[in-house]
Amino acid sequence: MQTKTYNTTPYDDQKPGTSGLRKKVKVFQQPGYLENFVQSIFNSLEDFQGKTLVLGGDGRYFNRQAIQIIIKMAAANGFGELIIGQGGLLSTPAASNIIRKYQAFGGIVLSASHNPGGPDEDFGIKYNVSNGGPAPEKFTDALYLNTKTISSYQIAEIDDVDLDCVGELNINHLKIRIIDSVADYAELMAKIFDFDLIKQSIAAGLINLRFDAMHAITGPYAKQILEGVLGAETGSVFNAVPLEDFGGGHPDPNMAHAHELTKIMFADNAPTFGAASDGDGDRNMIMGANIFVTPSDSLAIMAANARSIPAYAKGISGVARSMPTSQAVDRVAAALNLPCYETPTGWKFFGNLLDANKITLCGEESFGSGSNHVREKDGLWAVLFWLNLIARKRQSVADIVHEHWQKYGRDIYCRHDYEAVDLDIANGIVDHLRRQLSRLPGKSWGDYTVKYADEFSYTDPVDNSVSANQGIRVGFSNGSRIVFRLSGTGTVGATLRIYIEKYEKDITQLDQDSGQALAELVEIAELLCEVKKRTGRTEPDVVT
Ligand code: G1P
Ligand code: ZN
């Protein structure tokens, strides 16, 4: 096959964020922009000649064009085999599974996760390593350096590949396999959960479910598994056809964006179980009739009940949560005498802990949870975990949650996001917070006395790498907490996230309205960071 080398000049904005490189589609469509980044990925890898690369994306606008370009670049750079999801589609957890199952060298996943899609919206690309997980920081740092010095990229002069036909194609030394996007993932889920039991519970009417795929990647996965294999009524999975612009929606599974599901679940005669997933299928929202389960509580409940699930019946080795995630899972870990790790935001920090078997379950407040079955968070896996749990316990979602709070107390929780904040203002807020840290301990507002205030730094217990400046924590002596950090996934200006958590162990107070319960802490947060004062805004853009 003929390959051609193109000269190029660096773009200066290709620094990977929390989860790969995310930019507006128009940015990715600039001449050589995608090519520079992909070539820089390959330039940061060693010894991949003749090896296997997995390729797939969430189907958003520009997915197909990007896949054709990457195929030609991977061919020119000497990969021996490409495994591609049919139609160029693979959910993020499915891609992680394929990398592991077929012992690939790595994978490129095209996704901007929960960000909107379409010609004027977002696109993204990330590299996953051979354990199936996002590349660690030392790789993304090296990759960024390469994007700053790149001078050429290589393209094989071959025809576009038909992505829609499952099958194999050989072009000289390169084998291209187009695989069914769902089959391997469905097989993995059947090994983890008790599908027969879930099926019986659905048939008996104990579980009556609705799943909102938000016109994103999990549509085909959920249709096949929930309706096809487990027998949920046809139509239980809705918004099931993946669209390039997600139907104009924002494919983020929270009550603000999954409003159709939220309406169904808070209606009279609501179904017993509701769930949604995001653009690339790694996030989840869990609901029951008239109840929303916070992701932090969901993780804690999973950890407390892991033994009810066949794959975890022998017990779990430990748990981890990202720093801003509520401390609910810590309480379970303490009670069960399990190791519990607090990591920076982003799934990449769980990889080493999972590989070293220090943890089995992990999660983030941002609607992500997962286990050692892959190295990404996994939306549908969390849904199946809950279905299996409900089927085993024969209890409603609300009863499971209330029983948990009675035993461990409740971490009342919410997150406020201020989006597209001017970069200088956002950095000013963080500097202002930083300057106060040493003076905060001992300071009181009402019932809240600051116990500690610091900037989170993480030392990975496996490879001792240090990740500093990972967000500001203000902890109170009554167990409550406020955390501030700037998002690493936004594409416009800066997004300030404020995470607010109040611990309530008085069993007569467990059912409080979270807005009311957290009002005082929200005021304290404003006194500390002055986001309203400095931006002139009156409220956050999104509350989850
Ligand atoms: C956000 C979430 C984080 C998650 C990431 C990728 O990152 O907060 O937990 O891992 O998306 O889904 P952030 O924008 O906060 O950097
Ligand atoms: Zn996602």
Image: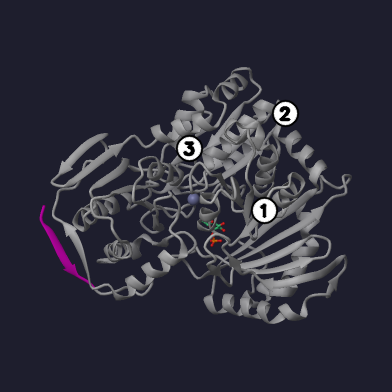
Distance from label 3 to label 1 (Cα)? 37 Å
Q: Which portion, as a residue range, is magenta?
A: 1-8
Q: Which numbered marker is on residue 340?
A: 1
In which quarter of the view is residue 394 placed? Answer: top right
Is label 2's Cβ within 8 Å of ligand 1? no
Q: Is residue 142 among the parts visible in the rendering?
A: yes
Tag 1's secondary structure?
Answer: strand
Task: Give how far apart the Cα atoms at labels 1 and 2 are.
Answer: 28 Å
Answer left or right for 267 relative to 51. right
**Residue count near mark 3 (Cα–Cα under 10 Å), binned few <14, some 14–19, many ≥20:** some
Q: Secondary structure at mark 2?
A: loop
Disc on res. 331: none
Residue under label 3: 239
Q: Is residue 373 above or below residue 152?
A: above
Check whether the beta carbons of the residues at disc 3 and disc 1 lie within 8 A of each other.
Answer: no
Q: Which residue is mark 2?
A: 395
Which residue is rendered at x = 88% and y = 68% of the image?
Answer: 446
Queried whether the magenta region covers residue 408, the answer comes back as no
Question: Is the residue 398 above or below the residue 433 in the image?
Answer: above
Which badge, 3 or 2, comes first in the chain's sequence?
Answer: 3
Asked if the residue at tag 2 contacts the one at tag 3, i.e. Cβ–Cβ closer than 8 Å, the answer is no
Instruction: Find numbered disc 3 in the image and state the secondary structure of the residue it sits on.
Output: loop
